[in-house]
């Protein structure tokens, strides 16, 4: 538990070495958007909205702050024109899901077309079911552009209907289906 | 065979193997690599064996099935020793002639030898232009040993480096030597190998791992495959030396299940090495313990990424994780893990045997050594080539590769696999090494080299790679998954003739964000094919978008077939061969094509008599009548 100091947006901040840069920065008052982050979950670095600029020695890089362990002497900027440009494009890629972020970044329409459903694949439901509920009822099926959330074949009945995934889901994809969880058909249909 | 208890017993075994080989000076070697096997090498092997038996020569002549020789275009390849006659494109029917003429009478079978442009026949492998300019440090053993025989490998000097490293060197000395040699990782990143080893060695923890990354997945690349298939002990020797230097007790070879021969030969090599005591407890009496297991990959491109590969070995889905803490510090089961590519490991015995200085003097200053490339695509001699770093692309494509078939013009060379880039004709003089290729907007990657000629459409080529990556991305991080989805969508629109003004700028913007924010190297390098294609071939994109034409006549929706009614004599051959009844016109009268029915199979062009040459491919969409349902489909 080594105590270290780093600079975040011009402020000198003390923190425990190795803790998540996102947590440290938020405690220091930085407003960093996230979609996939949840304190209870192990999975990190999916949505990339929490990117920040880190200068370590002479090296400047963009990192996902949620997965980045803090070190002594880091110089961090949580918002630069470059960062905001990338965040805005990421939000535009998700439009019309994650509307709270779209509002924040002034995204009113998307220049992209093609199928996009309600689910933005933030992974909160899957990760909660695995890491916290220890049920493993949900999983990611397929990879790349084919990735989607599905029930593990034959395990849907093992869902204890804890309902946590309804609350976590920002896309209205996981729905309450007469007390059981159900997967909204619109999720990947793009309609 | 009892295990080798000490270095002396290894030397004794080597002498005995050499004597055994010398007892049969006449040898027929045939390439049993995947390329030659596909060209029916197995049939040749059987036929040669039968021919040898028929002439009662089994006691005098050795028939050896080796690994890949490299000139895959002209396989199966047969080499007859001691004269070193080299025969190309051998079939089972040639077996008798080879045995009778070359073995019994001692003269070459001229018709099977390589023929130069000047029609002069070339007897030996080294004199074929394809091989003349190569420096085959790693691939040489492929042609000299049977990969199923550890004795063969030991006979040509195999495991001498292991003996030297274990008995006469300290781990620190080995790492110093690898650092001095300047060897850089051959998997694509080009990270200094010695430095990586040192980090893993110095990382805290008693239990450490070493891993061979043989999850080669680039389309058109088969360097690692051929090394594992043709000389698995060479890689194993490098791995054991590395494990000793790093202080690892366990190693893994991660090899794709789609490479059955590589899996088979690697598993066998490990068993043989265990039997000889070159793996296991107290290797060669040095007190060093180390063992290796094979992990078969289930065929995901992204599993070639180090952290995804390690997740896969642990039994998880192969998805990358953030590597702000390197795998050399926290890798497999959170232990320090050193992962290197097949070719990197294969270089190690040579560095130990010949010395770091020797190695550093091969190739260029910043990228020493040789590099194996799989030279494929529109090139005369496609195959595996190994050249010193720094050789120009032009020399590789024209001198070694023999240039472009059919007197066509070269348009681009794609290097570095799907995450690499296109280099146009004007950049052919770029010396090939890690840094020069990166400066040129491409990358070394693991060594794929795809040659494209004037018939290749760069928009379609970029689309192909993006399609590959969009489906091979793990899909975890947003920029990679959604960014590639949209890049693919835009490119699909452009090749279908629905490109819009602003598409190029939008793609460039997407590429910037993807490169800056993606989680792993697959994502950050995914924009390379699009970026380099737009940079060097912007006008080709613009013609697709603005004029709805594909100048290379490759994009199905942007060309059509046309019959020149002045040249057509009405023979009706095209009409008879059209599968969709799209040719209109009475017999003996010039024909026309009903573009609505045409499926663009090209049969009409193929069957039209060459003296008429009335059918041609024309860039641009066909003019469809206004009421055409096809037109409504497109615009609707």
Image: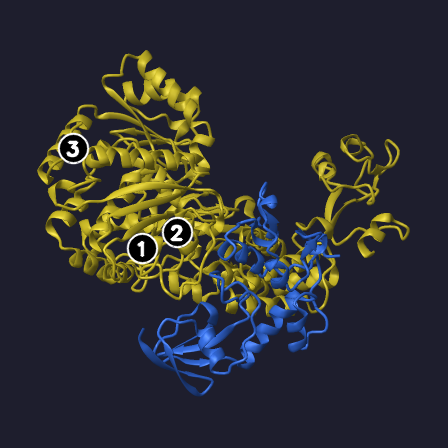
Nearer to us: label 1 or label 3: 1
Q: State the SS at label 1.
A: strand
Please name the residue shown 37% across and 17% down the image: B96
Colour assignment, chain A: blue
Residue B310 spot, x, y in % from top left: 39, 51
Q: Chain of mark 2?
A: B
Q: Nearer the viewer, residue B221 or B601?
A: B221
What's the CA distance linking mark 1 and mark 2?
9 Å
The residue labelled by disc 1 is B337
**Along the polypeptide, which appears first: circle 3 or circle 2?**
3
What's the CA distance linking mark 3 and mark 2?
32 Å
Q: Chain of mark 1?
A: B
Residue A88, image quadrant: bottom right
Colour assignment, chain B: yellow
Residue B393 spot, x, y in % from top left: 43, 56
Numbered circle sitting on residue B504: none
Any part of residue B447 in sight = no
Any part of residue B173 in sight = yes
Please name the residue shown 79% across and 41% down the image: B598
Numbered circle sitting on residue B3: 3
Please name the residue shown 21% across and 56% down the image: B358
The answer to the question of whether label 1 and label 2 lie on touching residues, with beta carbons closer than 8 A, is yes
Q: Quadrant of the C terminus of chain B?
A: bottom right
Nearer to us: label 3 or label 2: 2
């Amino acid at each position: 538990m080594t105590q270290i100091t780093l600079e975040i947006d011009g402020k000198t901040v003390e923190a425990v070495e190795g803790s998540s840069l996102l947590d440290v920065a938020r405690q220091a008052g930085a407003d960093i958007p996230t979609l996939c982050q949840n304190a209870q979950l192990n999975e990190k670095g999916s949505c990339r909205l929490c990117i920040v600029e880190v200068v370590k020695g002479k090296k400047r890089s963009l990192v996902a702050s949620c997965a980045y362990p803090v070190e002594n002497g880091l110089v961090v900027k949580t918002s630069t024109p470059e960062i905001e440009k990338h965040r805005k494009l990421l939000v535009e890629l998700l439009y019309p899901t994650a509307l709270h972020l779209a509002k924040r970044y002034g995204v009113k329409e998307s220049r992209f077309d093609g199928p996009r459903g309600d689910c933005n694949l933030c992974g909160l439901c899957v990760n909660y079911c695995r890491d916290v509920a220890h049920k493993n009822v949900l999983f990611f099926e397929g990879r790349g552009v084919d990735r989607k959330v599905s029930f593990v074949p034959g395990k849907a009945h093992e869902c204890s209907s804890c309902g946590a995934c309804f609350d976590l889901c920002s896309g209205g994809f996981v729905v309450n289906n007469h007390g059981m969880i159900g997967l909204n058909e619109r999720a990947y249909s793009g309609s | 065979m009892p295990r080798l208890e000490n270095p002396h017993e290894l030397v004794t075994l080597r002498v005995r193997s050499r004597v055994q080989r010398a007892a049969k000076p006449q040898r027929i070697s045939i390439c049993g690599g995947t390329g030659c096997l596909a060209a029916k090498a197995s049939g040749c092997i059987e036929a040669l064996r039968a021919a040898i038996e028929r002439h009662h020569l089994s006691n005098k002549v050795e028939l050896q099935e080796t690994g890949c020789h490299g000139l895959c275009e002209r396989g199966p390849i047969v080499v007859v020793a001691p004269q070193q006659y080299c025969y190309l494109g051998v079939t089972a029917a040639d077996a008798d002639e080879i045995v009778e003429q070359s073995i019994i009478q001692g003269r070459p079978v001229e018709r099977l030898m390589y023929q130069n442009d000047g029609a002069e026949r070339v007897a030996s492998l080294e004199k074929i232009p394809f091989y003349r300019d190569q420096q085959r440090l790693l691939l040489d053993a492929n042609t000299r040993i049977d990969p199923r025989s550890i004795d063969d490998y030991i006979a040509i000097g195999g495991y001498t480096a292991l003996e030297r490293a274990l008995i006469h060197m300290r781990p620190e000395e080995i790492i110093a030597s690898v650092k001095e040699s300047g060897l850089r990782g051959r998997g694509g990143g080009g990270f200094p190998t010695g430095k990586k080893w040192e980090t893993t060695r110095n990382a805290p923890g008693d239990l450490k791992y070493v891993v061979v990354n043989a999850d080669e997945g680039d389309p058109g690349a088969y360097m690692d495959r051929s090394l594992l298939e043709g000389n698995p002990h060479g890689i194993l020797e490098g791995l054991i030396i590395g494990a000793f230097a790093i202080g690892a007790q366990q190693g893994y070879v991660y090899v794709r299940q789609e490479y059955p021969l590589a899996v088979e030969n690697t598993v066998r090599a490990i068993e043989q090495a265990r039997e000889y005591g070159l793996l296991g407890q107290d290797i060669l009496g040095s007190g060093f313990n180390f063992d290796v297991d094979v992990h078969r990959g289930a065929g995901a491109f992204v599993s070639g990424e180090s952290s995804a590969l390690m997740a896969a070995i642990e039994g998880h889905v192969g998805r990358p994780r953030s590597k702000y803490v390197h795998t050399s510090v926290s890798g497999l089961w959170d232990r320090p893990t050193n992962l290197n590519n097949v070719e990197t490991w294969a270089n190690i015995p040579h560095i130990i045997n010949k010395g770091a200085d020797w190695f550093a003097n091969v190739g260029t200053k910043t990228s020493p050594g040789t590099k194996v490339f799989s030279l494929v695509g529109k090139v005369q001699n496609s195959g595996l080539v190994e050249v010193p770093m720094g050789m120009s692309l032009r020399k590789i494509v024209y001198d070694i590769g023999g240039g472009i078939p059919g007197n066509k013009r070269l348009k681009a060379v794609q290097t570095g696999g799907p995450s690499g880039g296109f280099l146009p004709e004007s950049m052919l003089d770029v010396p090939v090494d890690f840094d020069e290729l990166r400066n040129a907007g491409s990358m070394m990657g693991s060594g794929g080299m795809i040659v494209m000629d004037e018939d290749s459409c760069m928009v379609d080529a970029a689309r192909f790679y993006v399609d590959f990556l969009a489906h091979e991305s793990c899909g975890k991080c947003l920029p990679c998954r959604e960014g590639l989805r949209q890049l693919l969508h835009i490119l699909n629109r452009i090749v279908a003739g629905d490109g819009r003004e602003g598409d190029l700028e939008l793609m460039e913007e997407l590429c910037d964000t993807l490169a800056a924010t993606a989680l792993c190297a697959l994502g950050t390098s995914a924009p390379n094919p699009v970026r380099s294609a737009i940079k060097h071939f912007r006008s080709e994109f613009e013609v697709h978008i603005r004029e709805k034409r594909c100048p290379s006549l490759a994009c199905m929706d942007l060309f059509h077939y046309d019959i020149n009614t002045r040249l057509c004599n009405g023979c009706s051959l095209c009409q008879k061969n059209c599968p969709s009844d799209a040719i209109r016109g009475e017999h003996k009268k010039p024909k026309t094509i009903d573009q609505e029915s045409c499926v663009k199979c090209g049969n009409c062009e193929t069957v039209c008599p060459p003296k008429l040459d009335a059918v041609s491919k024309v860039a641009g969409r066909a003019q469809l009548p206004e009421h055409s349902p096809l037109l409504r489909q497109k615009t609707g």
